[in-house]
Image: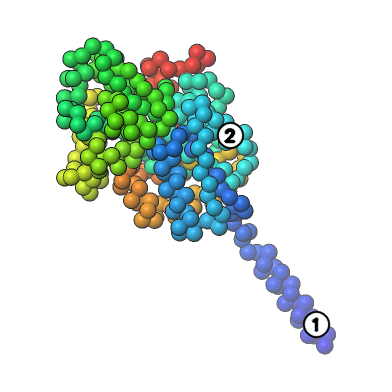
Amino acid sequence: MKTTIRNLSLGVACLGFALSSLPAQAWEPTHPIEIIVPAGTGGGADQMARTMQGIITKHSLSKQPVVVINKAGGAGGEGFLDVKNSKGNNHKLIITLSNLFTTPMATGIPFNWKDMTPVAMMALDEFVLWVNADSPYKTVKDYVDAIKSKPDNAFKMGGTGSKQEDQIITVALQKATGKKMIYIPQSGGGAVAVQLVGNHIDSSVNNPIEAVAHWRAGKLRPLCVFDAKKLDYKDKIAGDMSWNDIPTCKSAGLDVEYVMLRGFFMPPGVKPEEVAYYVDLFKKVRETPEWKKLMSDGAFNQSFMVGAEYAKWVADAEKLHEGLMKEAGFLAKSN
């Protein structure tokens, strides 16, 4: 009997040692996950966030639901300050666009991307010069010649927000053409596209995803893409045209280039294992057919970065935007 008890005791001790040797359970959310969009509904960031929300739900990639919340006030500053002030909140993320840099530089709000925790670059978004399909402008040359033939402020350019990426590109276009335009800000890229379809503006520099539905419907026409190389996607989108058929603006005689971050950050003070959970979640999202369709429909550059590489990219982009904002005269006086 003593032998039996002794053996049982040894067995329990061995089991306890084995359990203590197992790796700790990986962290995962315990209540709904918030994705903050620092822009209005219908724009590129909003569409990406809501597509991801749908993917995560459909494929059961998280035990907790995902809630998308738009906080566009103050050119997105409302959203950034929310995340900055949510120290340690491991159930909150924010999807970024160029207002990550432009908003604090233009407004002087007490925020910098370093106030948050980098998680992952999901893609780089492109910008396309769009005109109404009924306009006489078939090429970049047609468009530029028309601007040059008219007095300053004869052309209306629509864009998302003020002193943000769309207006930065507009300032670069003004410099390239030697003519001033009237810049008309909207709350989001969806609203900009509607304004162009309705002929309330003469052009826009919307992201592909913000205007592709109107291109398919024959309402808008792309003239060029503001990237150093043509887009890779060759599936037909509108008639016989694919994204790959759109020339670069530079090759068409308009020397302006710009791409934009689509990435995620978390509040300050979160733990590495919490960041790792979302990195893993995003990797799973990227493998789904719905994500691949979004990338194709929106003609995204599918760069993916995490960790130090991502942080370095963001730091370099901040320097670039500081130069662009300074040249455009958009820096707050304190800068």
Using the numbered discs, state the Cα–Cα distance from disc 2 to disc 1 in whole angstroms: 60 Å
Residue 5: mark in rendering = 1
**Which of the numbered marks, if any, corresponds to residue 82?**
2
Q: Secondary structure beneath disc 1? A: helix
Query: Residue 121 is drawn in which quadrant?
Result: top left
Check the image and name the residue furthest to the right. 2
Furthest toward the bottom, the residue is 1
Question: Would residue 277 appear left or right of 212 to someone viewing this image?
Answer: right
> In which quarter of the view is residue 128 placed?
top left
Q: Is residue 74 left or right of residue 164?
A: right
Amino acid found under the numbered disc labelled 1: Ile
The residue lying at 29 percent from left, 14 percent from top is 153
Image position of 22 with respect to 2: above or below: above
Amino acid identity at mark 2: Asp
Choose mark 2 or mark 1, whichever is in front: 2
Q: Earlier in the sequence, mark 2 or mark 1?
A: 1
What is the crowding at mark 1: few (fewer than 14 residues within 10 Å), some, or many (at least 20)? few
**102, above or below 288, in the image:** above
> Could you say where residue 239 lies in the image, as x and y percent from the top left?
18, 45
- Residue 131's x, y, as percent? 24, 30
- Judging from the image, what secondary structure is the residue with disc 2 in? helix
Quadrant of the snapshot with the N terminus: bottom right
Q: How many marks?
A: 2
Q: Mark on residue 155?
A: none
Image point 44% across, 37% down: which residue? Answer: 41
> What residue is drawn where x is 22% and y is 24%?
254
